[in-house]
């Protein structure tokens, strides 16, 4: 700046004759060139004060701005009247008048650049100017005195003073401070922030304060901050953070963004403090109030709140709620004989197992001692509650190992259902408790419903499941075989294997197969069927009788984890029979639910020449597209559709299935054919195979050869 002024000034010639007027008006005379005129005019309009002093300090020439900037100072130099204001040096100390002339360059041969003077005004206000001066003979050897250029630096001084103070506060504050750039990255950090985060400033620079947050909460924090900043420009909150050492601590953070008029963030300031101690104390208190310190499960207080909310919610949605009162059977014995320490560890493990069984939205509470309460929400009916109770009992059935002791605890469970068994939490808890005593009385290790009807259902289901488990273990089943015939020739083309339980309590397969599916027994049961069917084929072959293809029903649950293909593969090898002796029937609905798992198994079956039939076709929701995409060979029309046939031209579904099968080139077996009229109509519509009481009920293995027209081993 001063360099530029210097050049301008050099271009000016000073007219002494005009210059020494009483009124120091524009006194620079310029030469005749246009440039000089313009420069003189500019000089008069700039903010800088320009003045030419004679060696004795008297003014020779000056511009307009020099009045404001230099009059006070010059009055002091000349000791003129009214020179009442102190002149200060850059540090604010008064300068004795005697030294002033020298400091502004009067009588000096040296140029002065950027020397700052303060002029103390009224009311403590200080006017600051920065001064450049140089001896006039530097311009022209004929000239004497000094040329001074002064600029107003008052505002600058105030600003930089403020910044100094701010920086000091920034550095010495006990709170951590960050200055962030427009992208939220740290560009400056104070000492406290280094202490809190464990990083030095150089490591902090470029990071976002959000990166201090523990990893699994970081995304959520980022969202919260962004949302708040977007709507209000600020964010304030706390989170669990990680120090450089890995130690975690609780961080409170307040973020203020500074935005441009168009709403773009220019920079931000973040304040942080470590609130770990305060937070931990609060957490501990709220934990003790709401949780059981041993098992860390919520306590009764929490349950009350949860139940109030859940009953209100269930009432609003017309839904159900279940309360399970769980009481351990042998806990007292463990506690008394092995000590409280073992008892405590046992309770912790029990709590862990219960939590594994229930969903996130349910609540598990330690009621006290060896009693737990499990409350389930969003139920359709009581059956889901019995399923959870079964799972709990099964999980307690596994021994718990505590300090080398193998403990069998077992539990009794009482169940009450909202709204049937109680309209509020107190009633539900009371009735679940009563049901629990009922379960204990009936023999330990059981569950009981408070309501008699549900209880009867649960008891019969539990009895059935238990009897089934025993039967599966013993293999106490038989296979019967129902013939399938060619629609044209009425020759036997195959046999469907159907299971029968030896224990009459299990009832027909339509009763116990669903129980097997729900209890997971179905894979063992299915394996038994496959092995038994293969063995029957082997026995026939050994007699010299070659039985027709045998169709085996499999539950789609068996398709899981390749257990089906593995079982078939092994059974076929063990019985030394070709794969193609078998056919597999899979129900449509179950197949649809497990399409992806099924695809692989179906491919394996196709590859080994095993025919696949879709059972009960028409009862599900198969789409043409999925039918086309699967390697299937036949459809079995459900008996219910066959029955509709012939009743005065009905049987729309059967007709539709037959024409669909035709277009997909699939074979069709009609099930449950009971009358000749049905058989004739089906044959007309293009159905290839029949199965039903019209031809034969399921028969025993011993009856099969004769039924197939086999006349016994040929005599050699
Ligand atoms: P499904 O596969 O549809 O079997 C046909 C059922 O219809 C058999 O009943 C059979 O006895 C019966 N049936 C055959 N012809 C006629 C008829 O003309 N009229 C009438 N009303 N019924 C007829 P079942 O043996 O009681 O089997 C019932 C269901 O149990 C079977 O239906 C099948 O889904 C399942 N099931 C049977 N055995 C097994 C098996 O070994 N494994 C699996 N997973 N399920 C099986
Ligand atoms: Ca079947
Ligand atoms: Ca069927």
Image (spheres, rainbow, N blue to C red):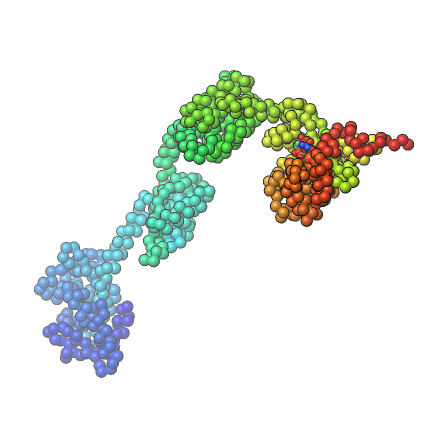
Q: Would residue 589 appear left or right of 141 to someone viewing this image?
A: right
Residue at image location 50% in from the left, 32% down from the top? 380
Residue at image location 24% in from the left, 69% down from the top? 111
x%, y% of residue 226?
39, 49
x%, y% of residue 105?
20, 67
Q: Would residue 453 appear left or right of 101 to someone viewing this image?
A: right
**Can residue 375 be seen here?**
no
Residue at image location 27% in from the left, 74% down from the top? 7
Number of numbered discs overlaid on the protein picture: 0
- The residue lying toward the viewer, choosing from 60 and 483, is 483
Quadrant where the image shows the N terminus? bottom left
Q: Residue most toward the right?
A: 716
Q: Quadrant of residue 707?
A: top right
Q: Is residue 267 above or below residue 654?
A: below
Q: Quadrant of residue 683?
A: top right
**Can residue 391 be seen here?**
yes
x%, y% of residue 377?
47, 32
Quadrant where the image shows the C terminus? top right
- The residue lying toward the viewer, choosing from 561 and 8, is 561
Residue at image location 40% in from the left, 41% down from the top? 239
Q: Is residue 386 above or below residue 656?
A: above
x%, y% of residue 462?
58, 24
Q: Residue most toward the left?
A: 81
Q: Would residue 404 appear left or right of 325 to someone viewing this image?
A: right
Q: Residue most toward the front?
A: 648
Q: Quadrant of residue 36?
A: bottom left
- The residue lying toward the viewer, choosing from 573 and 153, is 573
């Amino acid at each position: 700046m001063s360099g530029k002024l210097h050049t301008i000034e050099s271009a000016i010639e000073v007219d002494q004759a005009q210059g020494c007027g009483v009124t120091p008006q524009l006194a620079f005379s310029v030469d005749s060139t246009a440039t000089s005129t313009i420069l003189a005019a500019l000089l008069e309009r700039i903010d800088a004060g320009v003045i030419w002093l004679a060696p004795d300090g008297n003014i020779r020439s000056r511009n307009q701005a020099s009045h404001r900037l230099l009059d006070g100072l010059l009055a002091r130099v000349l000791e003129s009247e009214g020179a009442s204001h102190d002149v200060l040096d850059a540090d604010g100390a008064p300068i004795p008048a005697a030294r002033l002339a020298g400091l502004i360059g009067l009588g000096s041969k040296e140029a002065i650049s950027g020397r700052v003077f303060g002029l103390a005004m009224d009311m403590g206000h200080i006017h600051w100017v920065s001064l450049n001066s140089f001896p006039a003979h530097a311009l022209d050897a004929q000239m004497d005195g000094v040329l001074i250029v002064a600029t107003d630096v008052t505002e600058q001084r105030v600003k930089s003073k403020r910044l100094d103070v701010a920086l000091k506060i920034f550095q010495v504050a006990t709170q951590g401070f960050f200055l962030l750039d427009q992208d939220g990255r740290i560009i400056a950090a104070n000492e406290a922030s280094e202490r809190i985060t464990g990083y030095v400033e150089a490591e902090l620079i470029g990071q976002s304060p959000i990166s201090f947050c523990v990893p699994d909460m970081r995304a959520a924090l980022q969202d919260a901050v962004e949302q708040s900043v977007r709507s209000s420009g600020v964010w304030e909150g706390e989170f669990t953070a990680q120090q450089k050492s890995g130690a975690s601590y609780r961080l409170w953070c307040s973020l203020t963004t500074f935005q441009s008029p168009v709403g773009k963030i220019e920079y931000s300031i973040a304040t942080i403090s470590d609130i770990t101690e305060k937070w931990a104390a609060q957490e501990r208190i709220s934990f003790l109030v709401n949780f059981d310190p041993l098992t860390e499960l919520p306590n009764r207080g929490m349950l009350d709140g949860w139940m109030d909310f859940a009953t209100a919610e269930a009432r609003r949605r017309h839904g159900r709620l279940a309360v399970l009162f769980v009481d351990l059977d042998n806990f007292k014995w463990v506690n008394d004989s092995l000590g409280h320490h073992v008892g405590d560890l046992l309770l912790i493990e029990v709590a862990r197992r219960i939590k594994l069984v229930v969903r996130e939205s349910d609540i598990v509470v330690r009621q006290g001692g060896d009693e737990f309460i499990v409350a389930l929400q969003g139920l359709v009916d009581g059956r889901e509650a019995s399923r959870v109770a079964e799972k709990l009992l099964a999980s307690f059935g596994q021994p718990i190992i505590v300090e080398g002791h193998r403990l069998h605890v077992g539990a009794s469970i009482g169940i009450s259902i909202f709204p049937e068994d109680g309209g509020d939490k107190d009633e539900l808890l009371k009735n679940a408790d009563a049901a629990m005593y009922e379960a204990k009385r009936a023999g330990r290790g059981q569950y009981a419903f408070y309501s008699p009807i549900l209880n009867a259902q649960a008891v019969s289901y539990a009895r059935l499941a238990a009897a089934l488990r025993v039967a599966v273990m013993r293999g106490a089943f038989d296979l019967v075989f129902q013939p399938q015939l060619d629609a044209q020739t009425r020759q036997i083309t195959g046999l469907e294997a159907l299971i029968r339980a030896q224990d009459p309590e299990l009832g027909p397969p339509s009763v116990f197969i669903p129980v097997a599916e729900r209890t997971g027994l179905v894979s063992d049961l299915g394996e038994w069927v496959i092995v038994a069917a293969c063995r029957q084929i082997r026995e026939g072959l050994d007699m010299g009788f070659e039985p027709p293809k045998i169709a085996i029903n499999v539950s789609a649950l068996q398709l899981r984890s390749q257990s089906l293909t593995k079982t078939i593969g092994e059974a076929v090898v063990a019985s030394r029979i070709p794969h193609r002796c078998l056919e597999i029937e899979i129900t449509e609905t179950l197949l649809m639910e497990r399409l992806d798992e099924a695809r692989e198994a179906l491919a394996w079956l196709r590859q080994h020449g095993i025919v696949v039939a879709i059972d009960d076709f028409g009862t599900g929701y198969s789409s043409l597209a999925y039918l086309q995409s699967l390697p299937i060979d036949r459809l079995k029309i459900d008996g219910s559709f066959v029955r509709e046939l012939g009743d005065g031209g009905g049987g729309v579904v059967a007709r539709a299935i037959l024409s669909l099968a035709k277009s997909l080139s699939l074979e069709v077996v009609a099930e449950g054919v009971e009358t000749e009229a049905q058989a004739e109509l089906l044959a007309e519509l293009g159905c290839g195979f029949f199965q039903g009481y019209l031809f034969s009920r399921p028969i025993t293995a011993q009856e099969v050869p004769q039924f197939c027209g086999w006349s016994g081993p040929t005599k050699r």
